[in-house]
Image: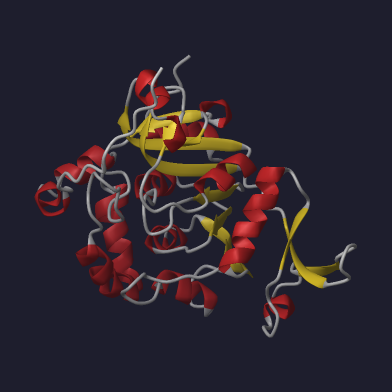
Amino acid sequence: MSKLVSMHDAIAAHVRDGDSVIIEGFTHLIGFAAGHEIIRQRRRDLTLCRLTPDLIYDQMIAAGCARKLVFSWAGNPGAGSLFAFRRAVEGKGPPLELEEYSHFGMVARLSAGAAGLPFWTLRNYGGTDLPVANPRIKSVTCPYTGEVLATVPALRPDVCIVHVQRADIHGNAQVWGLLSTQKEAAFASARVIVVAEEIVDEAVIRADPNRTIIPGLIVQAVVHEPWGAHPSYAQGFYDRDNDFYVAWEQVARDEATLARWLDEWVYGVKDRAEYLARQPDLRARLTAKPRPSGSVDYGY
């Protein structure tokens, strides 16, 4: 049975007020189109989870979607700060609860959630005050060595949204290039939305099974959304829009300017197709040039 739906319908069915939501992707394949649809549908009181919340979470915070942020680093990669995030933290915007970990602490939380374990142990946080700032970071004594290890609780989001290069209509999703914790986040979450640059026949997925990081059996909805990761990038499809990241510094610095940007580019467009139609230069500037990386003969 096909799980293919529109972005509007996927968000309407699977993202609810009060949910914990993780939009995965580490620099690469960040689900901006999905985040914009969450904003358009005016979801509220969300707990946003992510190793590196960047521009999309800044936009969602500015739009009033977020109640809490669970994270390990926040910023505008290579360009500066997240000013909606900063205003919230500094008490100059909507209040935002924070729960901070290290990068590996977040990876460990998702790994525990994916494995069905209550917590994960790690050699981390020594010499830092993060356990003081975050009482959810605890410790346990190893029953084999007597070593004291840090622990973090399992993270089990209500919804995981993953942007991928290609998927079939059943949700079997493939990624190549820079990976993050897409697989762990998907297996840890109660509901999974896969957003794909390209929908391909199941035979294409089966012909190259090692690229499949998320199996359709854990996916609730599949969305076909070309350029849905812009201004981040999709390896083999389009490059990172560095100009956008640099420009965001001035957009987000002023609350009124950011609100006008949301009105024009999120609330003011129906969907990602209209967003692209308003920027006809994107394809000329950013479309990736072909660079095949050999082939593999699986035989039969």
* Quarter of the image where the C terminus is located: top left
x then y, percent, for residue 11: 46, 37
Q: Is residue 275 left or right of residue 170?
A: left
Q: Which residue is more in the foreground, 164 or 261?
A: 164
In the rendered image, the residue lying farthest to the bottom is 127
Q: Is residue 141 left or right of residue 44?
A: right
x then y, percent, for residue 111: 65, 51
The answer to whether one can see residue 11 in this image is: no
In which quarter of the view is residue 296 placed? top left
The answer to whether one can see residue 20 in this image is: yes
In which quarter of the view is residue 81 placed? bottom left
| Mark count | 0
Q: Which residue is more in the foreground, 279 or 217?
A: 217
Q: Is residue 116 left or right of residue 279?
A: right
Q: Residue at x 44, y 60 (%)?
A: 57
Q: Residue at x 71, y 53 (%)?
A: 154
In which quarter of the view is residue 174 placed? top left
x then y, percent, for residue 233: 29, 52
In the rendered image, the residue lying farthest to the top is 1
Q: Which residue is more in the foreground, 155 or 21?
A: 155
Q: Residue at x 37, y 44 (%)?
A: 176
Q: Residue at x 21, y 40 (%)?
A: 274
Q: Which residue is more in the foreground, 53 or 84?
A: 53
The colouring scheme, among rainbow, by chain, secondary structure or one colour, is: secondary structure
